[in-house]
Amino acid sequence: MRLTANELRALLDDTWFGSLPLALRRDLLQQSAIWHVPPRQVLATQGSVPDVWFGIASGAVKLSACSSSGRETVLDLLEPGQWFGDAPVLTRLPQPYAARTCAPSTLLLMRRSVLQDLLANHAGFDAALTRLNWWRSERLMERLGEQAEPSLPERTRHQLQILARRFGIRMRSATRIGLALTQAELGGLLGASRQRVNQVLHVLECEGAIRRAHPYIDWLDAHDPADASAAMRPKTKGNCLP
């Protein structure tokens, strides 16, 4: 089974992967298994010791962590072109988050032994993984900064703009956020309860900013995501966690 042209382009368009030497990119693609996954497929559980490194060719993956009380916090939503899970795989330490698809996805899977062979055979690959982890740390700091916005309506509006830009499907007069997120999951991303998120979404719908089309949210053209804050980063900086 092969990647489609669009899936391959998503990987190559990522700054981290696209900057790797050609021989290394070729080996990463050739030595990874391809897995077509439905939505809500569990890829990794929090606290497990994984043996697989993942790359996302299409779809989306949610990273989340649960507190001792059972409350879920959504750490990040990863888009095509991003890779995750290398640090737990290489260190054999427990994974600090759970990973689950939130859209039909095509994933690349690389076993620990293969990843170690590539590190041994490609000079500079270890430095490339260090750069990837630095970008993840930078993105995590940005996520923390977003949570500092005290107004939940503004946090929600800003986050929906980001999601429309990163996961948008163009429709007539609207951009559909192509993720089937529950209100509880959106709340976990925003640091708010499902009930409060539902209230804010109702207000945004009345303002004409969004249209709810269960299980999706459409961002309407009058509030074009292209006008989102310049603080929004392109996808090329990697995901927030290793």
Image: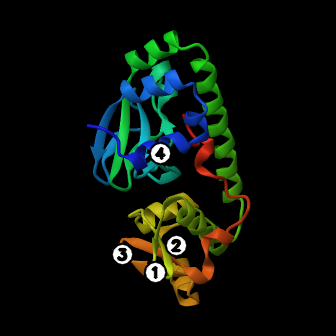
Between circles 2 and 1, the one closer to the viewer is 1
Could you classify mark 4 by the number of other residues whose Cα lies within 10 Å: few (under 14), some (14-19), or many (20 or more)?
some
As drawn, the label of residue 197 is: 2
Pick whichever of labels 4 and 1 is earlier in the sequence: 4
Q: Dot 2: what SS?
A: helix
Between circles 2 and 4, the one closer to the viewer is 4
Pick whichever of labels 2 and 1 is earlier in the sequence: 1
The CA distance from mark 4 to mark 1 is 25 Å
Measuring from the top left, give residue 49's x and y in whole percent.
Answer: 40, 26
Q: Mark 4 near mark 3, Cβ–Cβ under 8 Å?
A: no
As drawn, 196 above or below 83: below
Comparing 27 with 163, the one in front is 27
Q: Dot 1: what SS?
A: loop
Q: Mark 2 near mark 4, Cβ–Cβ under 8 Å?
A: no
From the image, tell me which residue sits under label 1.
172
Question: Farthest residue toward the bottom?
Answer: 206
The CA distance from mark 2 to mark 4 is 35 Å
The CA distance from mark 4 to mark 3 is 30 Å
Pick whichever of labels 2 and 4 is earlier in the sequence: 4
Between circles 1 and 3, the one closer to the viewer is 1
From the image, tell me which residue sits under label 4.
9
Q: In which quadrant of the rendered view does residue 19 lie?
A: top right
Amino acid at the residue labelled 1:
Arg
Residue at 48% of width from left, 20% of height from top?
A: 90
Q: Dot 3: what SS?
A: loop
- Can you say which quadrant of the picture contains the C terminus? top right
From the image, tell me which residue sits under label 3.
214
